[in-house]
Image (cartoon, grey):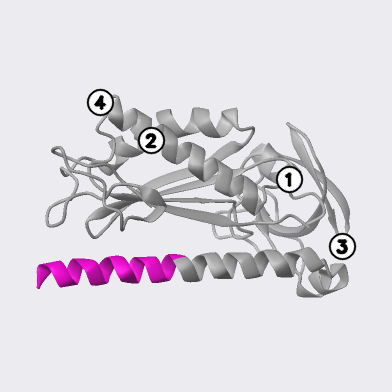
Amino acid sequence: MTQRGRATRSTGRPRDGGSRDSGSRDGAPRAPRGGAASGGGDLAARRTQLRTVIEPVVNGAGYDLEDLSVSRAGRRHVVRVIVDADGGIDLDAVADVSRAVSAALDAAEESGGDILAGEYQLEVSSPGVDRPLTLPRHWRRNIGRLVKVTVRGAVALPGQRAEPSGGRQLTGRVVGADDETVQLETDSGRDSLTYAELGPGRVQVEFTRLAELGDPDDTDVDDEFDDADDTDDSDDIDDEDDVEDEER
């Protein structure tokens, strides 16, 4: 089964001649205390700027940039990057992409591009099963999985639920996908549908199927992710304590 993971890095850059703070994670500089907030720039514009820097890095590493978002969390920005590839992406690859993206952002800011003023947190992850299937590559990467999707304009059959906007909800296993169509194996047989006919697909979690597969690697990977998440939480708590101490 595909291994999934997330890598989190907290970084930033000194401003007004500030020096590196040895307490910053990853050896990255912290923005000065008491006023490292963004200049109030439009987050949508920042997202566009970030994409111009991040997407070439992700593509150059052989992955697809599935989503990119930027938000504010207190005094820092949080940049979330979701990447994927055929065959999935494991934890080591996520960490490699995180380091490459972080270096690219630092280089862009050092060259004069004020993309993210002050400290920011970078989160790079692979898509979870809850992310909708909207592109041909999403369907292709989920061959073998059970998916629920709305077929637009189709009349609901007896026993099937009709959508308020029209169409019918279909649940089937993805058995094939190309650039034009997807093939779903349902209780009534195999359906070949064009992407224009389909709404966003949702992967259905099959606990009995996971138990049958019994992949021992998944347990190890989950433990690594739990450890990583625990580390992130403790780092964030330390950061908050530092801020509170200085404010006092």
Instruction: State the residue position of label 2.
Output: 105
| Residue that extends furthest to the top in the rendered view of this protein | 111
Instruction: State the residue position of label 3.
Output: 187
Q: Position of residue 147 (x, y in %)?
A: 72, 58
87 or 33, which lies in front?
A: 33
Give the amino acid type for the residue marked by disc 4 in the picture. Gly
- Tell which circle, 3 or 4, labels the residue nearer the N-terminal end: 4
- Tell which circle, 3 or 2, labels the residue nearer the N-terminal end: 2
Q: Give the quadrant of the N terminus.
A: bottom right
Give the amino acid type for the residue marked by disc 2 in the picture. Leu
239 or 155, which lies in front?
A: 239
In space, the residues marked 4 and 1 are separated at their CA atoms by 39 Å
| Mark drawn on residue 112 | 4
Instruction: State the residue position of label 1.
Output: 141
72 relative position to 248: left or right: right
Q: Secondary structure at mark 3?
A: loop
| Residue that extends furthest to the front in the rendered view of this protein | 22
Which region shows up in magenta? 232-248
Among the 4 quarters of the image, the one containing residue 93: top right
43 relative position to 191: left or right: left
Q: Position of residue 61 (x, y in %)?
A: 60, 32
12 or 206, which lies in front?
A: 12
Q: Classify 158 as above or below 133.
A: below
Q: Position of residue 173 (x, y in %)?
A: 81, 56
In space, the residues marked 3 and 2 are separated at their CA atoms by 49 Å
Q: Secondary structure at mark 1?
A: loop
In space, the residues marked 4 and 2 are separated at their CA atoms by 11 Å
Point 73% across, 45% down: residue: 141
Residue 51 shows up from this direction: no
